[in-house]
Image (cartoon, helix red, strand yellow):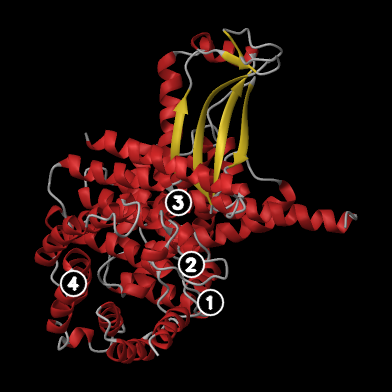
Amino acid sequence: MSKYMLIMRADDQGVATYEELPFDQVIEAMGRYNESMMQAGVLLAGEGLSDASEGFVVDFSGEKPLVTDGPYGETKELFNGFWIIEVASKEEAAEWASRAPLGPGAYLEVRRVHDESDFPQDNEWIQKEFGWREEQAAKAGQAAQS
Amino acid sequence: MTDATGERRVDEESARRSVVAVWRIESARIVATLTKVVGDFGLAEDLAQDALVDALAQWPVEGVPRNPGAWLTSVAKRKAIDGWRRRERYDDRLAAIAHDLEAEQQRQTDAPPWDPDEIGDDVLRLVFIACHPVLSREAQVALTLRVVGGLTTEEIAKAFLVPTSTVQQRIVRAKQALADAGVGFEAPARDEFAQRLGTVLGVLYLIFNEGYAASSGDEWMRPELSREALRLGRTVVALVPREPEAHALVALMELTAARFPARLDRDGHPVLLADQDRTRWDRSAITRGRAALARADAIGRGRGAYALQAAIAEQHDLAASVDDTDWQAIVAIYDGLVSLTPSPVVELNRAVAVAMASGPGAGLELVDALADDKRLRLSHLLPSVRGELLARLGRDDEARAEFELAAQRAENARERAVLLAKAAARR
């Protein structure tokens, strides 16, 4: 089995369509979609992102990274949320993605999540990355216990 | 490689995989719905399989229908009606059912495929049928993987290293046994619910373990089978969210599966817990497992056997090394497990934990007390643990003899090789 990330994007039209729908209806449709993936045992994680006005951009084009409020340059589509699912095949990921309750102007980009077998295990930076992740997990664990 | 035939083959293969994907997603709901409609699980399963055969023939040519679950269900229902007509058992009652089905098919085109509130109960009934106590363990496993998991007979056969015909036979006999026992499409009564749920969880854990530590064959583990069990565990949790042991089983499977990436070396040889590269453990699986255990605890009905085992796995997963492991905590959890589910295997594992907490001598005393237990007499576990403890005490000759005995009894080829290597290292 492999993990896939379903990344939700929408252009201006998509955002407009979404905003016209009654909020309850949106919540219910998403709730049903999420529930169907939970019942199938494939959903590992998922989050929605808040409005882009609350976010910002860090631009690395210049000498120093530049933090700006946006606008998001030439970007015509914004990321709005994601799901991570664990499924048996690319086709199964495609099947789940195509069931998302989204409309015109919305897109799901589906990407396979790397698993550790994709990396050379003896690379020292890969090892450091694992070590760093372990520290984070340990901290998260302590936080959860306190 | 890009000639027209080649491309078509690729397209057909991709379309076939799409059908299989839809089947994995929909089969439980389809079989559950059909069982409810036709009132006979065996017939419902046959009809669903026939509809799948139609899909495999048609979808690669005509494309996947807009609502594949409804398509498969409609086709299966039509087959039910045709079958009744053909067998001239088309009495008034069946005529009425057929009329309803046909009317329903008209409406179905626009309707949303499933109402999760309603279908959830039907799928749960299906899970209980697949794990019904009148069935043998093997039959429960095969039926669960096939009707709840949506695996093909070939996939199940491959996972359990048995011929496809064997799995087919198990399923045919299982359906017969359910029919003979007059098992209906209903959830277990309140007074037997806990026991029946226990059977369901037991079947899933058996599937998980078969993948985790393959009991026979050349492969040390078949992680895809374990992941399938984990997926089905999540399904059961979604169906019975108020059952702590369902959450706890998912926690146990997540916390165990988290170590899969470190369990084999580059050559496919097993790596024991003590020697595993813990940086390779799957941290997000550990997080999910701990969250599942917390959900089990939050229900507030105390810890059952799966929760205690999950808590032991959690202790291992959180430790940076063997030495860093809180062995006293693990011994304490084993104490709980021994009193809840007394078994020589649990006692043996507890002895290992005691050896880690208080030294190999203390562990060996407990192991020796189990030496006469009939249930361990044929298992490789006791000599294997005994050999380990003797080796740590420097009693090499005795350790070697124990490892050799354990190797004789081990049924898994790779496990046997590890034990023989340990014996050889004591020469």
The answer to whether B3 is drawn above or below residue A16 in the figure is below
The picture quadrant where one finds residue B128 is bottom left
The picture quadrant where one finds residue B175 is bottom left
Residue that label 1 marks: B164
Residue that sits furthest to the left in the current view: B339
- If you read the primary sequence from the N terminus, does the residue marked by circle 2 or circle 1 appear first? 1
Q: Chain of mark 1?
A: B
Assess whether mark 3 and mark 4 are in contact (beta carbons under 8 angstroms): no
Asked if badges 2 and 3 are on one and the same chain, I answer yes
- If you read the primary sequence from the N terminus, does the residue marked by circle 4 or circle 3 appear first? 3
**Nearest-to-viewer mark from 2 and 3:** 3
- Measured as percent of width and height from the top left, residue A5 is found at 55, 37
3D distance between C-alphas at marks 4 and 2: 28 Å
Inspect the image, locate mark 2, and give the three-letter code of the amino acid beneath it.
Arg
- Measured as percent of width and height from the top left, residue B41 is found at 38, 62
Residue that label 3 marks: B279
The answer to whether B195 is drawn above or below residue B414 in the figure is above
Q: What mark, if any, has residue B17 been given in the picture?
A: none
The picture quadrant where one finds residue B183 is bottom left
- Seen in the image, is B32 located left or right of residue A10? left
- If you read the primary sequence from the N terminus, does the residue marked by circle 1 or circle 4 appear first? 1
- Measured as percent of width and height from the top left, residue B315 is found at 27, 53
Inspect the image, locate mark 4, and give the three-letter code of the amino acid beneath it.
Ala
**Nearest-to-viewer mark from 2 and 1:** 2
- Seen in the image, is B418 located left or right of residue B189? right
Assess whether mark 1 and mark 2 are in contact (beta carbons under 8 angstroms): no
**Nearest-to-viewer mark from 1 and 3:** 3
Inspect the image, locate mark 1, and give the three-letter code of the amino acid beneath it.
Thr
Inspect the image, locate mark 3, and give the three-letter code of the amino acid beneath it.
Thr
Q: Is residue B44 visible?
A: no
The residue tagged with tag 4: helix, strand or loop?
helix
